[in-house]
């Protein structure tokens, strides 16, 4: 992992992993859609992945989430 996720990015990542829809995530985190997209892209960049569907695998591998 290149850089550490911010607390907000970490929360966003967890909500994405939980399967929450974008609209609900924006409401839950009190952010707009553009902020959501920017943070999601930052997460992908920091985790060095190019597709959101790989986020769970990489998050577990890097110890960012536990099951």
Image (cartoon, rainbow, N blue to C red):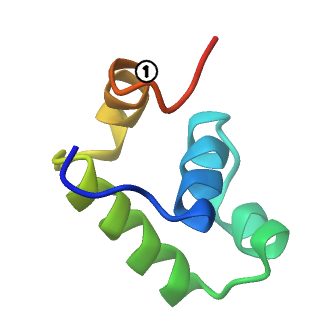
Lateral position of residue 52 relative to residue 18, left or right: left
Residue 17's place in the image compared with 49, above or below, is above
- Residue 33, position in %: x, y? 57, 83
Q: Position of residue 2 (x, y in %)?
A: 18, 53
Image height check: is 22 above or below 57?
below
- Is residue 22 found left or right of 48 in the rendered image? right
Q: Nearer the viewer, residue 16 or 42?
A: 42
Q: Nearer the viewer, residue 14 or 3?
A: 3
Q: Is residue 14 left or right of residue 5?
A: right
Callout 1 crowding tier (Cα within 10 Å): few <14, some 14–19, many ≥20: few
The quadrant the C terminus occupies is top right
Callout 1: helix, strand or loop? helix
- Residue 61: x %, y % from top left: 33, 19
- Quadrant where the N terminus lies? top left
What residue appears at the point 81 percent right and 74 percent down from the top-left corner? 27
The answer to whether residue 38 is above or below residue 48 is: below
Percent across and percent down for residue 3 are: 27, 58
**Left-right relation of 2 to 44:** left
Question: Which residue sits at x=37%, y=55%?
Answer: 4
Q: Which residue is mark 1?
A: 60
Residue at the (62%, 66%) spot, across then down: 8
Residue 39 position (above or below residue 12): below
């Amino acid at each position: 992992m290149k850089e550490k996720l911010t607390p907000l990015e970490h929360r966003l990542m967890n909500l994405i992993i939980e399967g929450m829809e974008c609209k609900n995530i924006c409401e839950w985190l009190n952010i707009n859609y553009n902020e959501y997209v920017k943070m999601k892209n930052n997460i992908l960049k920091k985790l060095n992945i190019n597709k959101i569907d790989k986020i769970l695998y990489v998050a577990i591998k890097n110890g960012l989430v536990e099951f």
